[in-house]
Image: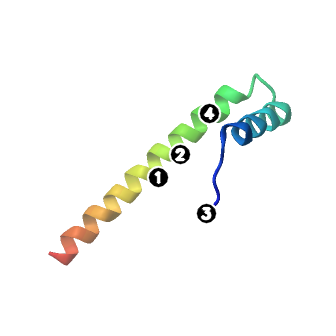
């Protein structure tokens, strides 16, 4: 299994900082948060639909 340690996370953050710049990071974080929230919402709805159909 692929494991990500603290040093790998720091390297990734440094690369992202260099690619996008400090001004764009809050925008990217906000968009990522909204995407994860929507993804969780959809998967929860799919689980609820699956549970109601199997009953």
Q: Position of residue 17 (x, y in %)?
A: 79, 31
Image check: 9 left or right of 34? right
Name the residue carrying label 3: 1
Q: Secondary structure at mark 4?
A: helix
Residue bearing mark 1: 39
Query: Dot 3: within a 10 Å radius of its alpha carbon, few (fewer than 14), some, or many (20 or more) residues?
Result: few
Which of the two labelled residues, at mark 3 and mark 1, occupies the earlier sequence position?
3
Evaluate if marks 4 and 2 touch, with contact meaning CB atoms under 8 Å apart.
no
Residue pictured at 40% horizontal, 56% vertical? 42
Q: Relative to 16, does residue 41 appear above or below in the rendering?
A: below
Residue ID at (33%, 56%): 44
Which numbered disc flags the more N-terminal residue, 3 or 2?
A: 3
Name the residue tied to disc 4. Answer: 29
Q: CA distance from mark 2 to mark 1?
A: 6 Å
> Which residue carries the number 2 mark?
35
Q: Cβ–Cβ below 8 Å for labels 4 and 1?
A: no
Q: Specify the quadrant that holds the C terminus.
A: bottom left
């Amino acid at each position: 299994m692929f494991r990500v340690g603290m040093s790998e996370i720091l390297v990734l953050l440094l690369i992202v900082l260099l690619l996008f710049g400090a001004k764009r990071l809050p925008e990217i974080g906000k968009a990522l948060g909204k995407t994860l929230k929507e993804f969780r919402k959809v998967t929860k709805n799919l689980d609820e639909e699956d549970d109601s159909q199997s009953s």
